[in-house]
Amino acid sequence: MLSKSQARTFFLGGTIITFVIFLGLSWTSLTKEVPKRTHDENLTADVIAGKHLWEKNNCMGCHTILGEGAYYAPELTKVVERRGEGYMRAVFSSKTPWAPRGRKMVAHNFNEKEIDQLIEFFKWIGNVDLNGFPPKPDYNSTINTK
Amino acid sequence: MKYNSQKVAYWFFALSMLLLSLQIVYGFIMAFAHMGYDGLHPFIAFNTARAVHTNLLVVWILSGFMGAAYYIIPEEAEHELVNVKLAYIQLISLALVGVVAIIGFHFNYWEGRKFLEIPRPLDYLVVANVLTFLGLILTTLYKGKKRTTTALVLSMGLLFAALLYLPGMIWFDNQTMDSFFRWWVVHLWVEGVWELIMGGILAFLLIKITGVDREVIEKWLYVIVGLTFISGILGTGHHYYYIGVGKTWLVIGGIFSALEPLAFLAMALFAVSMYRKGEKKHPNKIALSWTLGTAITSFVGAGLLGLAHTLPQVNMYTHGTLVTAMHGHLAFWGAYGMIVFAIISYTLPNLTGRKLFDSMTGIVAFWLANIGMLGMTVAFGVAGVAQVYLERKMGMDFGDVQKEIQVHFFVLVVCATMFATGIGMYIYEFIRYGTPSKEALLTKD
Ligand code: HEM
Ligand code: HEM
Ligand SMILES: [Fe+2]
């Protein structure tokens, strides 16, 4: 039967081994993969300022980005591709809460410069390689209307 | 209660209950907003309510853990807490930081990173606070007569939890890097070091309640926390599938996170078999219910409902939907909410010297809270699965889908009312016990 000291060795040994592997994998990811997949070279001052605005206003408190955040408002990683710049400008500059289907967004009153920065941020993040997320809808049967 | 300084635990538990009550209020605000009743929007927008809800959650759980440590460490180490005054200062500063952060959230004073919304300047206060706490606990342990495995595992969990807060304080220009390290805090907390804290408290309770030999209980404790780390550390990969890092994580994260439920299964089997094995029948049945309850519910909420969406093929569709909220609720409640309730139920009679544990109210509170939370989980789950099919599979617009699933939030509110009633009754009992007394030192636990 397992003794207490064997149990302790299992705990300590297992922890140390998996932790070392974890650090190794993280290092490879961060140094080799992230710069390429996220197009590090495109992180301009505007993109970074856009990220600041994203955080300062806690946009993640309603929306998701990279699939992380809240479930009250749409996922925004691919918003440039889905809605286009014009639509986004209208949302960002709206003086009253934007509420396309009744659900209200906070009216942030961003100025022109801030709007540009946010759009640059979304353009940058829209180009990150996410292994296929968000999935393309694949329901292709016909809907029976009769 | 054997040591006078254990009394400080009571006040951490009281703070914990107060913050939980507030958390529930903000939960209702969000549930109504999801139903379309957003009258509070100009004053408390959804993102404010959400930041308050989740941060209060973390603070009430941490306050409960701290109270547990202040009770357990002196008893296990057989030594009074080294500095009681400092412990009260730490309590007050914890409450102050919490209150300032919560008020700040109403005035756009935050850092919009999920679960880490507390702004940077306040983070430093959190660090100072936690260092004080750790200093007190570790010195007491060091000076004490005994260093039991239970006390060591609990302290180790608390120490690592503090260390892991730090990666969350680094600024990154790149959202992918930001997210990568945010998980070192969030994931490695709930699926790593917090499980050590939970395991330590659980072992303490089982020793006290079942009377099973300490050596046996502590041996299994090592096995459980071993399983936790072996699966949980590399299991972090289940958050790295779709955030802009490579495909290796799909394999590593998939395999190891699928093993994570084993630690929770072990915890459930452990609690139930120790209970069966125990000769002693402790009269505090309410503490026993919460102790067995936390072991079983955490297996369902974290283990099974975590497993349900942890494989990359499934997570591709459920990532960032209400399915996650379903799992988040039962996991947090079962593992960390209920363990705090268990330690409070066990310690209150000992701290106050009043043995009021035969009450019907306490039993009803247990069942109402748990059935209510299960119902909420089902409501979130149904809404989430419907969302996945309509939005991710069929391609309906987000807003149209939300209209379709509004009705499930009505069910959520009904179940949440039941949950809140249970919590209300529990807090009523808490108040009925009164505050810690001198006589408690003379009565047997
Ligand atoms: C007590 C333990 C646990 C707690 C408190 C917990 C809580 C949570 C929370 C709050 C989230 C949302 C995090 C965020 O988006 O920022 C989450 C996500 C997740 N959890 Fe857990 N969890 C626990 C254990 C587990 C286990 C054991 C598994 C797997 C078997 C698991 C699988 C997942 C997955 C796959 C996600 C990501 C969901 C998504 O892609 O949106 N969890 N968990
Ligand atoms: C009356 C009770 C409650 C209600 C009505 C409620 C409702 C909600 C709602 C509507 C959300 C936001 C989902 C979104 O982003 O759209 C949420 C988030 C959350 N709540 Fe609650 N809640 C309640 C109690 C609790 C309790 C007791 C816990 C923990 C023990 C908890 C833990 C969480 C967590 C971890 C999240 C974040 C989930 C995620 O991002 O995946 N809630 N809650
Ligand atoms: Fe996780």
Image: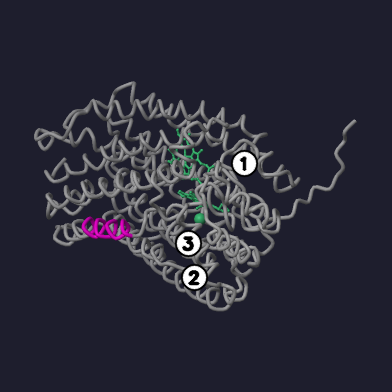
Which chain does tag 3 point to? A
Percent coordinates x, y for residue B295 in the rendering: 42, 43
Q: Is residue B131 magenta?
A: yes
Please give the range of residues in magenta: B121-134
Q: Nearer the viewer, residue B51 or A93?
A: A93
Percent coordinates x, y for residue B93 in the rendering: 22, 50
The answer to whether B341 is drawn above or below residue B181 in the figure is above
Mark 1 or 3: the one toward you? 3
Which chain does tag 1 point to? B
The answer to whether B257 is drawn above or below residue B301 in the figure is below
Labels 1 and 3 within one chain: no
What residue is at 56 percent from the left and 28 percent from the top?
B411
Dot 3 corresponds to which residue?
A: A52
Which chain does tag 2 point to? A
SS for tag 2? helix
Dot 1 corresponds to which residue?
A: B384
**Quadrant housing the C terminus of chain B:** top left
Q: Give how far apart the Cα atoms at labels 1 and 2 are.
A: 31 Å
Relative horizontal placement of residue B428, taking residue B309 as reference (left or right)? left
Name the mark on residue A22.
2
Name the mark on residue B346.
none
Is mark 1 in CB contact (under 8 Å) with mark 3? no
What residue is at 47 percent from the left and 37 percent from the top?
B42
The answer to whether B65 is drawn above or below residue B252 in the figure is above
The mark nearer the N terminus, 2 or 3, is: 2
Circle 2: residue type: Phe
Mark 1 or 2: the one toward you? 1
Q: Residues within 10 Å of mark 2 (few under 14, many from 20)?
A: some
User: Is any atom of residue A58 visible in this view?
Assistant: yes
Q: Residues within 10 Å of mark 1 (few under 14, many from 20)?
A: many
Q: Is mark 2 within 8 Å of ligand 3?
A: no
What residue is at 62 percent from the left and 37 percent from the top?
B383
